[in-house]
């Protein structure tokens, strides 16, 4: 087991290098020397110093090496547009809000989605099942900006129950978390239902029933536990889902998180920030995949050898 | 393996073009596609979804031609109207007829959707079939590379791609939306190719001296067709939502050009007073995505009965 975990952790290093490399090469294609803007004319000596400091004239592989070193020492470099601000400052300021939003959304998705899937599976082929599946199919298809704006329209504007935008008190955080959590919730419900239906037909479930165990106990003890394993595997892709959604939700609710700042940085052509945030989001997903794989290896020993 | 007899028969026909299959007594042909069609039609949800899907596409293609309004025609006298007989979806803040504009936007969204999906399939087929067909170390390396990219958020990479190209229209959107979305398709194709490679008819073809490109083009790829058709309807919703998100945050198709995402972006400015402007394009997106999901489910049952859910 330990061998599996160590191997899996070491495998993360080349993955990180590849992903940083791809992002780095893509950002280079956008190109342009940030210190040659005509509106920022500086004396030639200063220009040379700046270029030396930021390795502008070094070959690409040297720049890549510097950047990798930066990422591994958690230093994403300075912002190209905001003077005196580093990408780290921006991350420190905006990232916690996005993390909080993502966690609440995730929580909502689990608390509502998992029971929904369980009930649908236990009441298979009844009106409850069809209703739950219709509900989750619809919410899987509706773009989050519609859910968000309609919630603002009805709950914040018409009822006046919560503020329409911002990120200060729990009242601010309620609507965005739910709006962001809807699509993952639908995904969870469908996933849990599918795996539960499968587990319910397993031999060990039949055995447990045959031994005379009560239905409730069988479901609670055998079915639920085994049905939740695939849900853990879905957490990786789900994180990507939530990141994409947060771009939209943060914009609508005016939440000063990473998603909103990303768009600002793209529009301001602040490419070092764009690159830093892209790498950060990718690293986040790579680590989520790592944790998921290790958890999966612990929960289901059969997968240890198949995956590295 | 329902595919094997079909294939052998087709091979035979290709060798003897003179033997017309229609002559003689009608044999009940158990054709793969006919079987699939029969299974698909039996699934009511999939049939309804397919019908609605076709209707929505037809509406988007033809309504802008026959509509009395122009999708970009500004008419402030009729701004922000609610649905009526003259304007079934109402009008937006510029007085443009939303029924026409939704069709116009749908043209762009659906075009981007299918274009990017085809690009995803193309990359996925090339990558997946090379990896699966060659096998060995190359396969291992290519799959490790995919593992590394697996789960990366497509939106930031789409945004960077658009920044590299430096131009945002429907063609560049197709590239941007396919660049970080082809990993799953490549995996599916590889898996299919590896499974098929072990089949007896492929071994037989090899034994009689068929070259690799013939085996690939004649036996392996045609038999991945079913999987690819399913993949179209799995990727399409993701791409259409991707276009909508990208345009909604102001980095995709931008007004006055219409796409469902661009319309939603415009609708965001007026949703406090006139929410229908964002509801209409969003519901259009949801309808198409929902239909595509149901079609994909139906196709999976029809084309790949082995994986059918209990």
Image: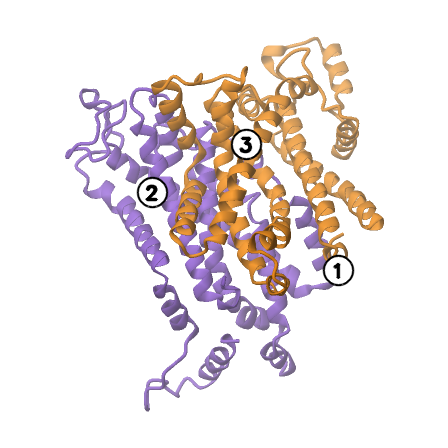
Chain colours: A orange, B purple
Q: Circle 2 marks a residue in which chain?
A: B
Label 1 and label 3: CA atoms lie apart by: 41 Å
Query: Mark on residue A105?
Result: 3
Asked where in the image residue B155 lies, by quadrant, the reply is top right
Image point 29% across, 23% down: which residue? B274
Disc 3 to disc 2: CB gap under 8 Å: no
Query: Element type at marker 3?
Result: helix
Taking B109 as reference, is B214 above or below it? below
Q: Mark on residue B107?
A: 2
Is B264 situated left or right of A95 in this image? left
Q: Give the image quarter of residue A38.
A: top right
Task: Output the chain of dot 3.
Answer: A
Residue A201 pos. (x, y %): 56, 62
Whether residue B192 appears in this view of the structure is yes
Q: Nearer the viewer, mark 1 or mark 3?
A: 3
Whole-number angstrom distance, CA of label 3 to CA of label 2? 33 Å
Disc 1: which residue: B137
The reply to whether label 3 and label 2 mark residues of one chain is no
> Disc 1, disc 3: CB below 8 Å?
no
Q: At 16% across and 37% down in the image, what residue appears? A: B68
Residue A91, how many percent across, how many down? 66, 21
């Amino acid at each position: 087991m330990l061998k599996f975990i160590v191997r899996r952790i070491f495998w993360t290093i080349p993955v990180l290098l590849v992903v940083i490399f791809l992002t780095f090469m893509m950002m280079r294609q956008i190109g342009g020397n940030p210190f040659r803007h005509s509106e920022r004319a500086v004396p030639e000596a200063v220009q040379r110093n700046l270029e030396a400091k930021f390795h502008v004239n070094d070959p690409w592989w040297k720049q890549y090496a510097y950047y990798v070193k930066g990422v591994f020492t958690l230093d994403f470099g300075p912002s190209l547009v905001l003077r005196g601000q580093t990408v780290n400052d921006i991350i420190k300021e905006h990232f916690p809000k996005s993390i909080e939003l993502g966690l609440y959304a995730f929580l909502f998705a689990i608390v509502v989605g998992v029971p929904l899937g369980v009930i649908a599976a236990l009441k298979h082929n009844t009106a409850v099942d069809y209703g739950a599946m219709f509900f989750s199919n619809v919410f899987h298809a509706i773009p989050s900006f519609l859910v968000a704006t309609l919630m603002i329209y009805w709950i914040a504007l018409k009822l006046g129950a919560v503020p329409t935008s911002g990120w200060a008190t729990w009242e601010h955080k309620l609507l965005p978390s739910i709006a962001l959590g809807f699509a993952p919730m639908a995904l969870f419900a469908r996933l849990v239902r599918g795996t539960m239906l499968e587990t319910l037909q397993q031999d060990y479930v039949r055995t447990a029933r045959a031994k005379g165990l009560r239905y409730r106990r069988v479901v609670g003890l055998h079915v639920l536990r085994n049905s939740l394993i695939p849900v853990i595997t879905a957490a990786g892709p789900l994180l990507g889902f939530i990141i994409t959604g947060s771009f939209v939700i943060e914009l609508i609710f005016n939440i000063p998180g990473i998603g909103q700042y990303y768009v600002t940085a793209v529009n301001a052509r602040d490419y070092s920030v764009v690159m830093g945030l892209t790498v950060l989001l990718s690293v986040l997903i790579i680590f989520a995949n790592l944790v998921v794989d290790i958890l999966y290896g612990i929960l289901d020993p059969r997968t240890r050898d198949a995956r590295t | 393996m329902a595919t094997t007899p079909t294939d052998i028969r087709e091979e035979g026909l290709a060798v003897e073009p003179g033997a017309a299959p229609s002559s003689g007594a009608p044999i009940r042909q158990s054709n793969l596609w006919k079987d699939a069609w029969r299974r698909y039609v039996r699934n009511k949800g999939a049939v309804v979804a397919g019908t609605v899907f076709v209707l929505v596409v037809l509406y988007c293609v033809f309504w802008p031609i026959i509509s009395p309004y122009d999708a970009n025609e500004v008419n402030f006298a009729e701004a922000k109207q609610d649905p009526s007989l003259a304007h079934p979806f109402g009008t937006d803040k510029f007085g443009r007829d939303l029924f026409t504009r939704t069709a116009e936007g749908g043209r762009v969204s659906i075009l981007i959707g299918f274009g990017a999906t085809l690009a995803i399939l193309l990359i996925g087929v090339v990558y997946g079939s090379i990896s699966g067909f060659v096998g060995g170390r190359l396969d291992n390396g290519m799959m490790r590379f995919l593992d590394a990219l697996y789960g990366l958020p497509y939106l930031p990479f789409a945004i960077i791609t658009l920044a590299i190209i430096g131009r945002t229209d429907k063609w560049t959107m197709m590239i941007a939306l396919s660049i970080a979305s082809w990993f799953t398709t490549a995996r599916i194709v590889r898996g299919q190719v590896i499974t098929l490679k072990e089949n007896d008819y492929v071994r037989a073809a090899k034994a009689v001296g068929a070259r690799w490109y013939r085996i690939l083009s004649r036996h392996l790829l045609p038999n991945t067709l079913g999987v690819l058709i399913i993949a179209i309807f799995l990727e399409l919703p993701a791409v259409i939502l991707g276009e909508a998100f990208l345009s909604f945050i102001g980095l995709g198709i931008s007004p006055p050009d219409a796409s469902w995402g661009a319309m939603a972006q415009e609708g965001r400015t007026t949703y406090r007073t006139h929410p229908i402007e964002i509801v209409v394009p969003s519901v259009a997106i949801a309808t198409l995505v929902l239909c595509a999901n149901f079609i994909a489910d139906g196709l999976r049952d029809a084309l790949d009965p082995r994986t059918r859910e209990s």
